[in-house]
Amino acid sequence: MEAKAKVTKEVLCEEARFILANMMAESKYGRQNSYDDIRRVCEGAVSIPFTEYVGFLEKSGYLKHDLDKESLEVTSLGEDVANGSSLTELTVQAVAHFKSARRGKGRSSKKSSAPTKIPPRRERFEEPRGGDGRSAGEVLDSRYEKLASIGSGGVGTVYRARQVPLNRQVALKEIRDLFSFFAEEQRPEIVRRFTDVVRAHAELAHPNILPIHDVNLEKEFPYVVSELCPNGSVRRLISDAETIPVGLALKYLLQTLHALQAAHRERVSHRGLKPENMLIDAYGNVKVGDFGFLRVVERDQSVIRQVYVGMGTVAYMAPELFVDPTGAGPQADIYALGIIFYELLTRKLPGRRSPMPSEVDPKLPEGLDDIFDLMTRDSRSERYSTVDDILDDFNKIDGLNEVMDQQ
């Protein structure tokens, strides 16, 4: 029997986003969100009855439920949440709503004199484990001193840390938050998967792949130590840079393509590529991290439920990841990188009626539109099958080097 996950506030937030993300995926391909279709996809993957989630999301303005047509529609507010915005507000609303609902059920059951054969389901809303373990200054294994938190997500928190024996700064990712999504009985399977993923990443050696220096998988909260990239991520560039030269966008695209090429040759797919894990080192080059991390929570025949941690990745997920995540491979990485490249050029995610890259920036070399188009086709049969094919087409573009020099 599958163990039940604790319903923490993080679980409420991510499961609400999971439902919204699935609705967005259906709408993206021109299909109407039938209530029954979305329910069939989502209800087995969430901890609270699907109908209760729909009630909360409608009440809070994240979706519209047309009772006559039995259809669901994501609002603009819901799209923002599914893509990673306003999560604190969503979490506060969800906890307040479901706590109130639980109390209401408790009061109504006391008033009823009729016995119930099945006791009402009880959810526990818990703070995540950890507390002051997150504080700067903590030393792990007498080797790594946490200096400051520099990022966090559904899997864990990344710290700028000092490697004590060598007195050098490194990045330390502590896998703490992930465990709050699952019951204690599921811990061995989570750790096993995480171990496999980290070892596969550590075997990759390439100038544009983030190297893993050290790891401790035996602690209560495992951690991974890697090179510190002091210039943040491509997400920071997209959000904060005044301008992004075309040459720089092309440079980061090609560097990431070479990183993926090396990984795919070792039969390692990223599966969760997004601007946040394309890191910029001290020399201004991209290093790709977190290879395979999404595998830790993918649905298959084991005890792990289907929980997409960090659903901000939905915009970069290839269509096949929504249908059969365990069967997705290198082409899903190609799709994600095509979306990221467009975002680097325009600061916007591409949609059905978005202009092609050359319409946004006439300075782009001829032929780049076709490459972008073939990277982001919905059908895998129409999409590039390998990174090698993409690089071959890049080599055919006239004037590429001149544009690359304009950084």
Image: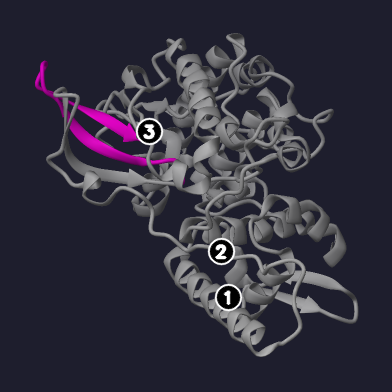
Q: Which quadrant holds the C terminus?
A: top left
CA neighbours of label 3 inside 10 A, class few (<14), some (14 to 19), many (20+): many
Q: Work out how far the residue at label 3 is from the one at label 2, CA to CA, in angstroms.
A: 39 Å
Q: Work out how far the residue at label 2 is from the one at label 1, CA to CA, in angstroms.
A: 8 Å
**Cβ–Cβ under 8 Å for marks 2 and 1:** yes
The residue wearing badge 3 is 279
Please give the name of the residue rendered at 37% of the width and 41% of the height, measured from the top-left corner.
Answer: 176
Lower sequence index among marks 2 and 1: 1
CA neighbours of label 2 inside 10 A, class few (<14), some (14 to 19), many (20+): some
Name the one closer to the observer, 57 or 188.
Answer: 188
Lower sequence index among marks 3 and 2: 2
Question: What x and y, as percent, mark residue 220?
Answer: 35, 33
Q: Amino acid at mark 1?
A: Arg
Please give the name of the residue rendered at 80% of the width and 59% of the height, measured from the top-left corner.
Answer: 38
The residue wearing badge 2 is 123
Q: Amino acid at mark 3?
A: Leu
Asked if the magenta segment contains residue 139, the reply would be no
Q: Amino acid at mark 2?
A: Glu
In what element is the residue under mark 1? helix
**Vertical order, 81 against 235 (above or below):** below
**Vertical order, 133 against 324 (above or below):** below
- Which of pointers 3 and 2 indicates the residue nearer the eye? 2
Q: Specify whether 185 is left or right of 137.
A: right
Give the magenta part as a residue range: 154-174
Does residue 84 show up? Answer: yes
Question: What x and y, as percent, mark residue 21?
Answer: 66, 56
Please give the name of the residue rendered at 46% of the width and 15% of the height, measured from the top-left corner.
Answer: 199
CA neighbours of label 1 inside 10 A, class few (<14), some (14 to 19), many (20+): some
Quadrant assignment, res 215: top left
The residue wearing badge 1 is 102
Question: What x and y, as percent, mark residue 123?
Answer: 56, 63
Q: Work out how far the residue at label 1 is from the one at label 3, CA to CA, in angstroms.
A: 43 Å
